[in-house]
Image (cartoon, grey):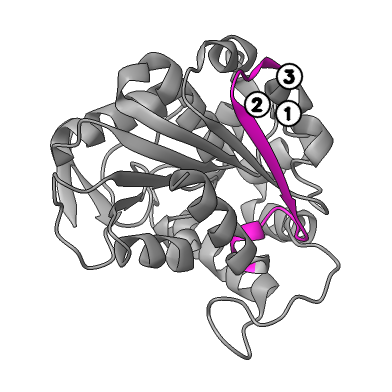
Amino acid sequence: MDFIVNGHRAYCYTGGKSIDSAKPTVVFIHGVLNDHSVWILQSRWFANHGWNVLAVDLPGHCKSEGPPPASVEEAAAFIVALLDAAGIAKAALVGHSFGSLIALETTTRSPERVTHLALVGTAYPMTVSPALLDGALNDPQRAITMVNNFSHSLLAPPPSSLGPGTWLYGGSRALMRRVLASNPNANVFHIGFKACNDYANGEQAMASVQCPTLFLLGESDQMTPPRAARTLASKARDAKVVTVKAGHALMTEAPDDVLFALGAFLTS
């Protein structure tokens, strides 16, 4: 479904459902060089179990137009504008990696709009190594390989939500290449990584959050290790921490565990 946000077309996967103001709403926010499809199992489940779903492509990514957000704050303003465009007064926010920082900043900026906050594969500060920052800018294909090496655990998970024969590493790498190619006018890879690296409001934002918060972490995550979420968790007032057996790409490595954790959190 398309919405006009800040004068540009913004795409959200809704599970094929129309928006119903009588239903609760959950917004899924992807990370760097991803799109709405990383939430495919989780978003479809919620869409078919009584929820409005807005699994967004961030601006400048794939099906959404406009300049890609150059900061977490800019992306958070987009999420608020998206809620306005969709006619949604309140929503639960679920964000992965870069998306988790966006969800957090959105919550502190518009606390009256957010019912639940789920931070998936999060860290603060979300420091990006100089090698990855440089690679994302000057050699993005090599950097995509590096990120995927770090994003997947050494576990041998059962077939993911895409079914038997799925190659998680190859699918993730192909997605990143497709997202990068979708915007020839801006390097969304480097822009996103720099936004993560530059974000400095995490502790203050977390301390101000009033709604229930879930930290959903991958125990084998090398990009945002569970220990890197301790700073935020220590500032949270009403938080639950769930760790699953997966790496940074936990939505595809452990799709059922992620779904069960989100379902329990959002329906409690």
**Which residue sits at x=75%, y=60%?**
246
Q: Amino acid type of disc 3?
A: Ser
Residue 23: image x %, image y %? Answer: 21, 48
Quick check: can you spot residue 233? yes
The reply, left or right, for residue 230 in relation to residue 103 is right
Q: Which residue is mark 1?
A: 127
Within 10 Å of the Cα at label 3, are there few (<14), some (14-19), or many (20+) other Cα atoms? few
Q: Secondary structure at mark 3?
A: helix
In this view, 74 is above or below 61? above
Q: Amino acid type of disc 1?
A: Thr
Point out which mark residue 234 bears. Answer: 3
Mark 3 and mark 1 in contact (Cβ < 8 Å)? no
Would you identify the image quadrant in which residue 238 lies?
Answer: top right
Measured Cα–Cα span from mark 1 to mark 3: 18 Å
Measured Cα–Cα span from mark 2 to mark 1: 5 Å
Q: Which residue is mark 2?
A: 197
In this view, 60 is above or below 234? below
Mark 1 and mark 2 in contact (Cβ < 8 Å)? yes
The reply, left or right, for residue 15 in relation to residue 9 is right
Q: How many marks overall?
A: 3
Quick check: can you spot residue 187? no
**Which residue sits at x=54%, y=36%?**
100
Range of residues picked out in magenta: 234-252
Task: Say if the magenta span includes residue 245.
Answer: yes
Q: Secondary structure at mark 2?
A: helix
Q: Secondary structure at mark 1?
A: loop
Q: Closest to the observer: 182 or 34?
A: 34
Q: Closest to the observer: 123 or 171?
A: 123
